[in-house]
Image (spheres, rainbow, N blue to C red):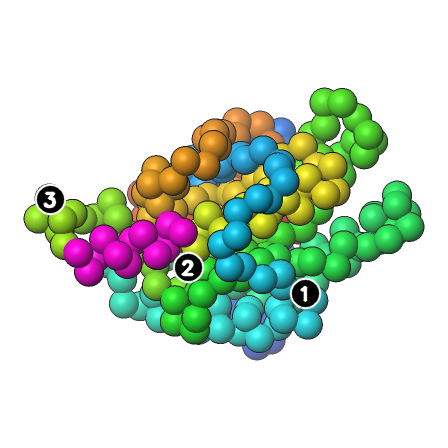
Amino acid sequence: MLELSKVLPEWQTEREICVGSVLYSDIGKTFYAGLGWHPFSNNNMHIELPPRIRTDTREARSLYADDLEELCKEDEILIRSQMTSKKFDRDTRMMLVPDHDHMLWHHKKEEFVCERLFGKQPTVKGAITGQPGNRVWVIWTHRFYQHPESASSSNTLYILRLVIEDDFDISQLSPDQEHDAVRLNRIETQASALRAVLECAQAEAQEWNLGHVNLWHPTPSVYGLLERMDLPYQRVDRENEGIASLLWYGEGSGKEDTIEWMGNEKFGWC
């Protein structure tokens, strides 16, 4: 790994410079840190929801493979705008681009596995609700670690990417703003939309007999919306698996004190 870290800055850099290397450690936080890949503690949180049959009639429609490429392009435009316009605690910020190639990697993997296990492939790749400018959508993947009929299944529906177009950070509301009717309506609309797509994910997990629905690295805004709904979930701080780690080649320490790593969701794990 030390030799690899020396090669990476100059590898495949004909069109772009290499600013860093990302890995997700499944052996805790210390081994790779000793080789230069520093764990980002704030990025190793996720929420876990149980599978369940969807009984709500909130409007949300399924996403299929043909829907994703255009949504990923729109997502990238939104990300670039947010990264340049929002206020951040640190001067340097980074994010892996949740492009269509990332989604394809996960989906081709799930299709191969499901075809071998069940003789069929998942066709629903996510869910979306709302009108352009106010949409909320999720893209997911099915992951099997154990036999599909295992009683204590760790098989999981991972939300690869959650997008809230009109993303409004509730945690930044002042006491005066908390009673602003316009802002409250905006927040309630977001909460209803988020619940709708998460319930679609839970129903998909139920259909495929998956034990959990996991959403990596929820933002303060997402946590705020979750607190406004009666959707059971639990927070998980990963200590040993899926530890987001960064080897930084740019200026600064390359640790959390100098870099804000945004959107560290499951799509980046590959």
Which residue occupies the foreground of this view, 146 or 119? Answer: 119
Q: Give the labeled residue for mark 2.
A: 164
Q: Which x, y percent locates residue 240?
A: 58, 28
Q: Quadrant of residue 106?
A: bottom right
Which residue occupies the foreground of this view, 96 or 154? Answer: 154
Q: Amino acid at mark 1?
A: Tyr
Residue 69 against residue 223 in the figure, above or below = below
Please provide the residue range marked out in magenta.
181-192
Q: Estimate the spatial distance between the alpha carbons at disc 2 and disc 1, rounded to whole Å.
A: 19 Å
Q: Which x, y percent locates residue 79?
A: 41, 66
**Residue 184 is a magenta residue:** yes
Mark 1 or mark 3, which is nearer the start of the sequence? 1
Q: Is residue 110 left or right of residue 170?
A: right
Q: Which x, y percent locates residue 205?
A: 67, 42
Element assignment for label 3: loop
Callout 1: few (<14), some (14-19), or many (20+) C-alpha neighbours within 10 Å? some
Q: Residue at 41% of width from left, 59% of height from top?
A: 164
Mark 1 or mark 2, which is nearer the start of the sequence? 1
Which residue occupies the foreground of this view, 148 or 195? Answer: 195
Q: Residue at 68% of width from left, 72% of height from top?
A: 66
Callout 3: few (<14), some (14-19), or many (20+) C-alpha neighbours within 10 Å? few
Residue 173 against residue 38 in the figure, above or below = below
Q: Which mark is residue 92?
A: none
Q: Give the labeled residue for mark 1.
A: 64
Q: Estimate the spatial distance between the alpha carbons at disc 3 and disc 1, rounded to whole Å.
A: 42 Å
Element assignment for label 2: strand
Callout 2: few (<14), some (14-19), or many (20+) C-alpha neighbours within 10 Å? some
Q: Which x, y percent locates residue 74?
A: 49, 73
Q: Amino acid at mark 3?
A: Pro
